[in-house]
Image (cartoon, rainbow, N blue to C red):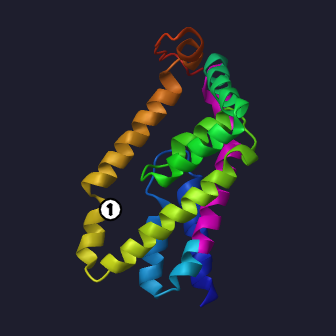
Amino acid sequence: MWWQYVLVFIGALLFDIVPFPFLPAFSIMLFLQLAFHLNIWYVIEIGVVGSVLGRYILTLYIPLLADRFLKVSKTEDVQFLGNKMKENKWKGQLLVLAYSLLPLPTTPLFLASGIARLKAIYIIPAFFIGKFTSDSIALHVGKYASENTEIILQGVYSFQSVIGVFLSLLLLFGLLFIDWRSLIQKKKFVLNFKIFK
């Protein structure tokens, strides 16, 4: 049924539109694929498009939240980091691709690009390739493991999931509280916790 694929799209979009570390979008894609016995390749294609759109929307509204809640100095600091990424477009694209292939939440990556007001062209193409690849692997592995639903349910709260969320929070901490200009320009590591208005 077509409406089940619409659920895949909406689920992936909603999982990746939130501005905080959340379950990966492939988890809702896998759940719906198993629950409705959907074609796995359609789920991957539709889910990845929903996920990419969710991340794109995140980059559009996160500058508004940053302007409202973060000090100007912190916003300028993250924009400086974004400008460094734009200086060498290929290195930036490779960084995004490599990061999106890792089993880590990509929320910090999109928060940084949104706050830095990077154009979507700098991040979305490489993210799409990495997301399609990593979600394809995750869904095929999940489908294979679906013979034992206990394994899947345990995987949601597995050691790897907890580590992934912890690393994502650590990356968010670094993005928000490290003074990136001091680190890159002066090679001096400085933490600044006074970032909110």
Q: Give the dominant element type of the magenta stretch: helix, strand or loop.
A: helix
Considering only vertical position in the picture, is 9 above or below 131? Answer: below
Q: Is residue 179 left or right of residue 144?
A: right
Q: Residue at x 49, y 22 (%)?
A: 177
In the picture, which quadrant includes the C terminus?
top right
Judge whether residue 6 can be spotted in this image: yes
Query: Crowding near pointer 1: few (<14 within 10 Å), some, many (20+)?
Result: some
* Residue drawn 53% across the image and 15% down it: 183
Q: Does residue 96 sit above or below 65 in this rendering?
A: below
Q: Is residue 69 magenta?
A: yes
Q: Residue at x 67, y 21 (%)?
A: 76
Q: Residue furthest bottom?
A: 1
User: Which residue is pictured at 51% across the width and 46% down the height?
Assistant: 99
Comparing 57 with 104, the one in front is: 104
Quadrant housing residue 96: top right
Residue 109: % across, % down: 56, 41
Q: Which residue is mark 1?
A: 156
Looking at the rendered image, the quarter that the N terminus falls into is bottom right
Q: Is residue 1 above or below residue 192?
A: below
Asked which quadrant contains residue 43, the reply is bottom right
Q: Magenta segment, which residues?
A: 45-71
Residue 28 visible to an observer of this rendering:
no
Instruction: Answer left or right for 53 relative to 100.
Output: right
Q: Give the amino acid type for the residue marked by disc 1 in the picture.
A: Val
